[in-house]
Image (cartoon, rainbow, N blue to C red):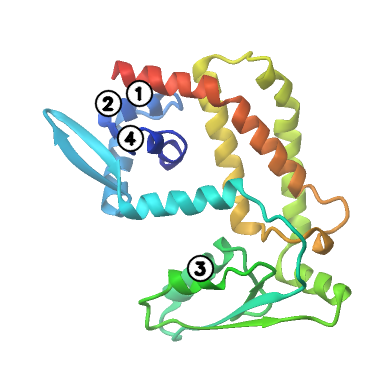
Amino acid sequence: MFDLFGDYLRYRDGEVRLRGLVALMACFDVPEATVRVVAARMRKEGWLESRKDGRETVYALTGAAWELLDEGRARIFHRARGPWDGQWHMVVYSVPETERALREQVRKKLAWFGFGPLSSAIWLSPHDRTDEVLAAFEGSPAIRLDTFRSRSSGLESDRDIASRAWDLKALDQDYAELLETYRPRLSRYRNGALTAQEGLVERMRLIHDYRLFPFRDPDLPPELLPAGWHGRLAHEVFLEAHGLLRVRAEECVDALLAAN
């Protein structure tokens, strides 16, 4: 449901009538009762707000949801360009032992920004995103963050650091599997062989399958990647498939919202 808001409903004022949301989710065989439960849960968690328009319930994105979707879109669709300057950007964090949930939150956020663990409390990235990290935890006094810049002894050491901070072998294999799934489908997408509903379902499955990669992929410079890396090609295939499916998917969304 959040993917629907992120890829479609955000561009339609970020809101939708409940019956329109039910119609959209029916494309994925999700029953109305489940839609109501999930929408209520998302409102409770602060991602949606609701209002009455006559007898209709309207759900709209909250400010926190807009921010998350903007961050997510940037991480999913954009890749770093230009040469690497050879500098590692490091974050050292300290969280009280009693705050295990908070420690896990810090780790997830660091991974989201493309940092990897060199040790349990020392995370690093080849990209300068330390300001974003500091801003994300501003107002959290229980979290202490120190940031540094550093260089290793050379490229061989840099590659070793990258292999220790991220499981690049497993990530590369998952990218290869994504390519095996979607690359053969591109010709069908180009030929416009899908119905509007099939286009919507296929595009949402594509987004669902790809959107978790930014949590795992630090977007390393080419010189730090293993030979035969599938990540860049997988990103290109994702972008092409996402674009090819756009017209049919949006036709489906527009038709269902107009009828509901």
Query: What whole-number distance in Å separates the C-alpha atoms at marks 1 and 4?
Result: 10 Å
Task: Tell me the amino acid under the disc marked 2.
Answer: Arg
Direction left: furthest residue: 54
Task: Give the residue drawn at x 60%, y 30%.
Answer: 243
Residue type, numbered disc 3? Glu
Q: Earlier in the sequence, mark 4 or mark 2?
A: 2
Residue underneath mark 1? 23
Instruction: Name the residue at 84% across, 82% down.
Output: 153
Q: Which disc number belongs to residue 132? A: 3
Question: From the viewer's perspective, is the residue at label 3 or at label 4 nearer?
Answer: 3
Residue drawn at x 41%, y 42% as measured from the top left: 2
Q: CA distance from mark 3 to mark 4?
A: 34 Å
Crowding around mark 3 (Cα neighbors within 10 Å: few <14, some 14 to 19, many 20+) is: few
| Residue at numbered disc 4 | 35
Which of the pair 174/62 is nearer the observer? Answer: 62
Of 168 and 83, the residue lying toward us: 83
From the viewer's perspective, is 75 left or right of 30? right
Residue 196: x and y in percent read: 51, 17
Relative to 92, is 175 on the left or the right? right
Helix, strand or loop at label 2? It is helix
Q: Residue at x 55, y 68 (%)?
A: 110
10 Å crowding of disc 2: few (<14), some (14-19), many (20+): some
Q: CA distance from mark 4 to mark 2?
A: 10 Å
Query: Mark 3 falls on what kind of element?
Result: helix
Q: Name the N-terminal-most of marks 2 and 3.
A: 2
Q: Which residue is mark 2?
A: 19
